[in-house]
């Protein structure tokens, strides 16, 4: 293969890669352990920050494990090599910090800690009945 055809092939591959970048991509990322935040700067100059405790795979990571963050060559992912975790930047832009199953679990955990007058009343009623009624076998 000649140098001209190699250059043309390379240029075509770069053009295809650029087409795949729909929207802003990651330009840099840093972990600020003092503030307990990961800050991602996008190609547009906009910054997105989040607590590692809110992201799947990062929730129990120590600050020294988050000190190294690599941006994937496409600019669409964050990779944390010390713990082997990844975050997809387009999902991050939409506020999605994990898989659907993991996010549902987080929402359930938040809902389970909610306190309201109706929830307290239901707990009192269930307590009078020695807990929830058992489902009868059909």
Image (cartoon, rainbow, N blue to C red):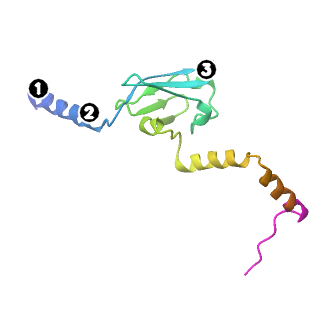
Q: Is residue 37 visible?
A: yes
* Residue under the image location 52 percent in, 46 percent down: 99
Residue 104 % position (x, y): 59, 50
Mark 1 and 3 residues: CB-CB less than 8 Å, in contact?
no
Is 72 on the left or on the right of 101, as rendered? left
Assign the magenta stretch its main secondary structure.
loop
Q: Is residue 18 above or below residue 113?
A: above
C-alpha gap between disc 2 and disc 3: 33 Å
* Labels 1, 3: front one: 3
Q: Pointer 3: what residue?
A: 33
| Sequence-first disc among 1 and 2 | 1
The circle on residue 89 is: none
Residue 86 % position (x, y): 49, 36
Q: Mark 1: few, some, or many residues within 10 Å (few <14, many ≥20)? A: few
Mark 2 and 3 residues: CB-CB less than 8 Å, in contact?
no
The circle on residue 18 is: 2
**Range shown magenta:** 126-138
In magenta segment, residue 5: no
* Residue under the image location 37 percent in, 30 percent down: 25
Q: Is residue 2 visible?
A: no
Residue 134 % position (x, y): 80, 70
The circle on residue 3 is: 1
Q: Nearer the viewer, residue 100 or 61?
A: 100
Which image quarter: residue 15? Answer: top left
Q: Could you say whether the residue bearing mark 3 is in a helix, strand or loop?
A: loop
**Farthest residue toward the top?**
34
C-alpha gap between disc 1 and disc 3: 48 Å
Q: Could you say whether the residue bearing mark 1 is in a helix, strand or loop?
A: helix
* Residue under the image location 54 percent in, 22 percent down: 31
Q: Quadrant of the C terminus?
A: bottom right
Is 112 on the left or on the right of 42, as rendered? right
| Sequence-first disc among 2 and 3 | 2
């Amino acid at each position: 293969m000649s140098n001209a055809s190699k250059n043309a092939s390379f240029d075509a591959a770069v053009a295809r890669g650029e087409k795949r970048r729909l929207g802003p991509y990651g330009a840099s990322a840093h972990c600020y352990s003092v503030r307990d935040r990961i800050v991602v700067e996008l190609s547009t100059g906009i910054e997105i920050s989040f607590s590692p405790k809110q992201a799947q795979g990062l929730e129990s990571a120590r600050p020294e494990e988050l000190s190294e963050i690599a941006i994937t060559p496409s600019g669409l992912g964050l990779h944390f090599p010390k713990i082997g975790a990844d975050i997809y930047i387009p999902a991050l832009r939409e506020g999605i910090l994990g898989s659907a199953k993991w996010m549902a679990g987080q929402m359930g955990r938040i809902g389970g800690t909610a306190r309201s007058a109706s929830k307290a009343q239901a707990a009192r009623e269930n307590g009078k009945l020695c807990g929830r009624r058992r489902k009868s076998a059909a």
